[in-house]
Image: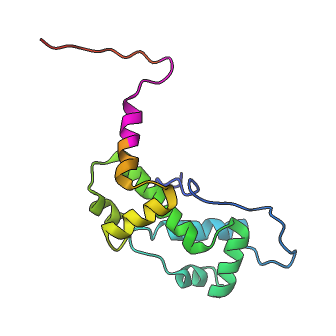
Amino acid sequence: MDETGIDLDVLSVSNVGAALPSSAARLAPWQVKLAKKGMAEQIATGMRIADIAVHLDLSVTHFSKAFRNSVGVAPYRWFLNAKIAHALHLLAETRWSLAEIANACGFSSQGHFSKSFSDITGISPTQWRRRHREASLQPRAGQTVKVIHEM
C-alpha cells in the first residue's frame, strides 16, 4: 500500500529479471517509485505519460521502454491496473454506485469501467462485489458465529 491507500502492485505483472539485453533501457529504482507515485496520484484525473516522462527528465519513448523493462508492463497498463486496484477497494469498502466508482477511478463512463474491469478480472464489477460480500459473511476457520433470534 502507498500513501493513497491503493495496493498498486496487486494487479501488476512483473517480468523483472527476465532475460533482457544488457543494453535494454531501465529506470533506476527511485525513478520507478517516482513514476508509480505520479501515476497513482492521477488515477481520478487521467494520466499523461508525457507528464511523467518530463518529471523524470526523459523522452516519452525512452521512459515507456525503460518502464516496461523495469516493471514488466507498459506504463499505461500499469496505470490501468492501478485504477482497477482502486476500484476493487471502493467496491469492497463503499456502497457507491458503479457510476460513482467509475468517476472516482477516472473512467469516462460506467460502461468503460465495467468493460475494463471485466477484461482484467474476468468478472463484472457487480459480480465481484457480490462475491466479495458473500465471502465476508462466511465464518472463517476457527471463528465462532453467534446467531441471535428475536421473538
Which of the pair 65/50 is nearer the observer? Answer: 65
How many numbered circles are shown? 0
Q: Left or right: where does residue 28 sit relative to residue 53?
A: right
Which of the pair 104/117 is nearer the observer? Answer: 117
Which region shows up in magenta?
131-142
Q: Left or right: where does residue 137 sit relative to residue 25?
A: left
Q: Position of residue 74 (x, y in %)?
A: 62, 73
Q: Residue at x 36, y 30 (%)?
A: 137
> Is 81 placed above or below 10 here?
below
Report if residue 84 is visible in the image: yes
Residue 131 lies in what quarter of the image? Answer: top left
Quadrant where the image shows the C terminus? top left
Which of the pair 115/40 is nearer the observer? Answer: 115
Residue 135 lies in what quarter of the image? Answer: top left
Q: Position of residue 60 (x, y in %)?
A: 62, 86
Colour pattern: rainbow
Q: Residue at x 41, y 57 (%)?
A: 87
Report if residue 3 is visible in the image: no
**Residue at far right of view:** 22
> Is 122 placed above or below 58 here?
above
Q: Position of residue 2 (x, y in %)?
A: 53, 55
Is residue 57 covered in magenta?
Answer: no
Q: Residue at x 80, y 61 (%)?
A: 17
**Residue at far left of view:** 151
Q: Position of residue 88 (x, y in %)?
A: 43, 52
Q: Left or right: where does residue 81 sit relative to residue 96?
A: right
Is residue 141 covered in magenta?
Answer: yes
